Image (cartoon, rainbow, N blue to C red):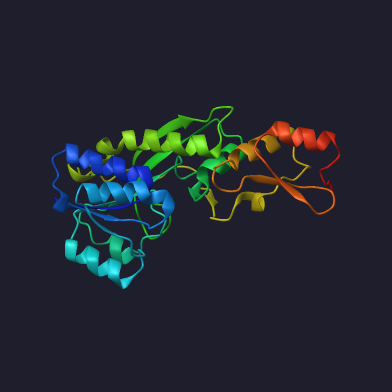
Amino acid sequence: MKILFAAFHTPGIRAIECLIQRGFRPQQIRLLTHNVDRNQALLDFSVMHGIETKMFSARSTEAYHWITEFRPDALFSLYFRDIIPKTILDIPAAGAVNLHPSLLPKYRGTFSAPYAIINGEKYTGFSYHYMLPAVDAGNVILQRQVPIKPDDTAYSLYHRLIIEGMAAFDEAFRLVTEEHYPGQEQVGEPSYYSRRVPFDGYIDPRWSREHIDRFIRAMYFPPFKGACVRLIGGREKELHSLEEYDALFADGEIEVE
């Protein structure tokens, strides 16, 4: 059996480790990934284990020919950052599977964890699902709830979802490659969030205090820019806590329309 991973960062490392523990040899695994600083650990890991790795765009001719030549039996997309085209999804006989950080069909698209915090959800979760050309729309193979804690930030929730999701990878892998489980159709009203930063990254002082707190936590993901507030005189300030916002508001520094 041959497996193609389209993966980013820690999930790619955990998946390769799982297959190595299952007895897979390096030549049975290939990795399509991204050449960015935050991904260096995965790049180093794949070199250390002799995994053939490419950083093609998923929509490129080079990626299509490289994957066609490999002829993978299954494809697993694990926090991969490109939309994978149908021409590639159709290649693996056992199917193409994605790990999505939400309880599908809710929170399709990107920024699913931040929006779950912003919207005041008590739970989110992860879903392994078959991939279709429509984003996050295929049958669900495995799905689990993950609680959102009162002090969760996008950063803490993102990493907990990775830990929980990858802990279930071996089970999802077995369901797909050994049991050929077709999954179940997604049930419920879908919601979708685009790659655009929520509310352009700015606090609206007209929001409730609870909503402002959730937004600040949802925007906390270092090293990226956090929630910002517009100040009197055309200035702005990045905030990391509700206490910082309260202090600025008490001092009359926040611009209120």
Which x, y percent locates residue 218? 59, 40
Which x, y percent locates residue 134? 42, 58
Which x, y percent locates residue 127? 39, 41
Q: Could you tell me which residue is drawn at 58 percent across and 28 percent down?
A: 151
Is 8 on the left-hand or right-hand side of 17? right
Q: Nearer the viewer, residue 190 or 18?
A: 18
Q: Nearer the viewer, residue 188 or 240?
A: 240
Q: Nearer the viewer, residue 125 or 200?
A: 200
Is 153 on the left-hand or right-hand side of 98? right
Q: Could you tell me which residue is drawn at 32 percent across and 33 percent down?
A: 167
Q: Nearer the viewer, residue 170 or 192?
A: 170
Which x, y percent locates residue 33? 34, 56
Q: Could you tell me which residue is drawn at 32 percent across and 48 percent down?
A: 42
Residue 139 shows in the view:
no
Above/below status of 163 relative to 69? above
Above/below status of 33 relative to 146? below
Report the label total.
0
Residue 59 shows in the view:
yes
Is 109 on the left-hand or right-hand side of 61? right
The quadrant in which residue 17 appears is: top left
Q: Residue furthest bottom?
A: 61
